[in-house]
Amino acid sequence: MMNANITNIRPDFALITNWIGNKAKVLDLGCGDGTLLTHLHETLEITGYGIEKDDSNWLAALKNGVDVIQMNLEEGLSGFEDQSFDTVILSQTLQAMHNTESIVHEMLRVGREVIVTFPNFGYWRNRIQITFGTMPVSKSLPYQWYDTPNVHLCTINDFDKFCAQHQVEVIERKVITDGQDVHVLPNLMGNLAMYRLRKQPT
Amino acid sequence: MSESNSVGIVKAQVAHFTQPLTLKSGAVLPQYHLTYETYGELNAAKTNAVLICHALSGNHHVAGRYTPEDKYPGWWDNLIGPGKPLDTNKFFVIGLNNLGGCHGSSGPSSVNPLTDRPYSATFPVVTVEDWVESQARLLDYLGIEQLAAVIGGSLGGMQALQWNIAYPERVRHAFVIASAPNLTAQNMAFNEVARQAIITDPEFFEGDYYNHGTVPRRGLRIARMLGHITYLSDDVMGEKFGRKLRHGDVKYSFDVEFEMESYLRYQGDKFAGEFDANTYLRMTRALDYFDPALEYEGDLSMALSRAKAKFVVISFTTDWRFSPARSREIVKALLDNALPVKYAEVTSAHGHDAFLMPDPYYHDIMRAYLEQIKV
């Protein structure tokens, strides 16, 4: 269900909305000020919780009326029961995680479905900067090499391989650049990768 | 000192109850009284009441002063007042002294109307459940059907939790701060040492010291000194006292040599002069006994399955007596019941005591949430 008021929100948030059912139970990891959860609540009447480590983000989320849990994702999701959420979201945070493998496993344990989005390091603009001998700095990767929180950047091909190797089923994948769908050469032409995942049936 | 956002001069009140109260232990209090204070105005719809539940050594004097000359205001004055995080322009705040206390409510040191002598050791052991029951009766007495919020830290947080088990329909919001769903063995061990210090004091007379004209001051003092160690963090003790010497150099004696000793003795003496030993025994026992999950085979989620309120759970990073991990157990049980909950882990150096301090982030949380409550 697309809604008229999505024009002002991040394009990946609008797309995430399409992957979530009405009245779903949603867990947003690294929820920031809670914009996504608030949007999902308004459009889909979801019930949701956010997880946020940073004090000022946490407080902003509280002020937005979000049920927000202050904890460090690196420590896993031990306070959450198996399959207790319809969807667990990790939007543009994967690349900054240290325990990347474990958080993906934890998300698949807690959520029936998982949505992961990340900046595609294989995007042609990044490749050009590398070709000219510097680390990429752009709108989606706005940091210098020495101050970046991003420790696990990957390309779409890398993540596809990761899913195949870790028994993760890709239900749907979307690649976008400046809010537009990318269908041709996504690993080269896509700026942002979005995955809808679930545990491969055993 | 600016008092512009103080509740000002306050006065304690007493409510008498003649309907017998059957306690969890099976003992019956045929009659009792509760001393309480209120701040702010109860609105016409009676929807703005907030109950403050006190911790081990707290009481009904939560905010304001009795006289302008009072050296200290109520124990949570930094939180409560006009324009403060718990704004008395909006809320009607109630603080009470729990049953078994020593600041005006029925307790071991108060006079038993049936004998005209202090209850002394005959005052029964009271539990968190009993307190919530008596608090509910105080609300009935004040004509308040439902609380906008119940707020408590430490042992007070246990009461806030218990409200949602005993009277879920009477609570809209619950603040469980620096608390735990039960005490660990280590935590109970501290209580046992504290009690042993009191009970083995030769002036204790099995709790009947009122009739012997004595006070088990030494025991109470040691109990409090021990408590204080556990309420502070190693870091904050290091920062406050370190290995600083009281007199510049060591005297090779057992008098006060280090600043830390001076602090502990001061705190112990002060407390022993104003608190009742029998009350201390009962407060620590209430802490020990609280374990709402017990009758659900340890399943706290089941224990909270009837809860209806929206919760705020707050812990402090260096609190090792009521550690963040214990608060997360409460959060998990609330999540299991799909209840609305906000959980903050406040970075503070002050250990368990942090919940009484005006940390900016902590108070921002309280303010922001309380502002959202509709009354």
Image (cartoon, coloured by chain):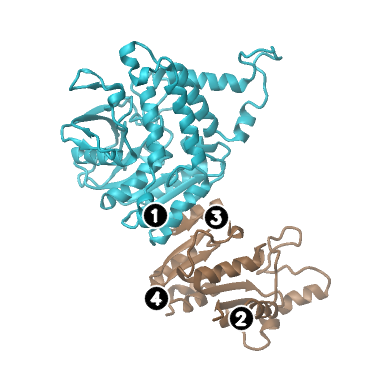
Chain colours: A brown, B cyan
Task: Work out whether residue A197 can be spotted.
Answer: no
Mark 1 and mark 2: Cα distance apart in space: 49 Å
Q: Are marks 2 and 3 in contact (CB under 8 Å)?
A: no
Dot 3 crowding, Cα within 10 Å, few <14, some 14–19, many 20+:
many
Of labels 4 and 2, earlier in sequence is 4
Q: Position of residue A41 (x, y in %)?
A: 41, 68
Where on the picture, by quarter, is residue A107? bottom right
- Chain bearing tag 2 is A
x then y, percent, for residue B194: 47, 28
| Residue pointed to by mark 4 | A22
Instruction: Give the residue furthest to the right.
Output: A133
Foreground mark, 3 or 4, reads 3
Q: Which residue is mark 1?
A: B297
Picture disc at residue B218: none
Residue drawn at the location 53% of the way across and 69% of the way down = A109
Q: What residue occupies the far bottom of the structure in this picture?
A: A184
Instruction: Identify the residue shown where x is 47% and y is 52%.
Output: B329
Mark nearer the viewer, 4 or 2: 4
Tag 4 or tag 3, which sits nearer the N-term? 4
Q: Secondary structure at mark 4?
A: loop
Q: Chain of mark 4?
A: A
Q: Residue B167: percent from the left, percent from the top?
A: 27, 49
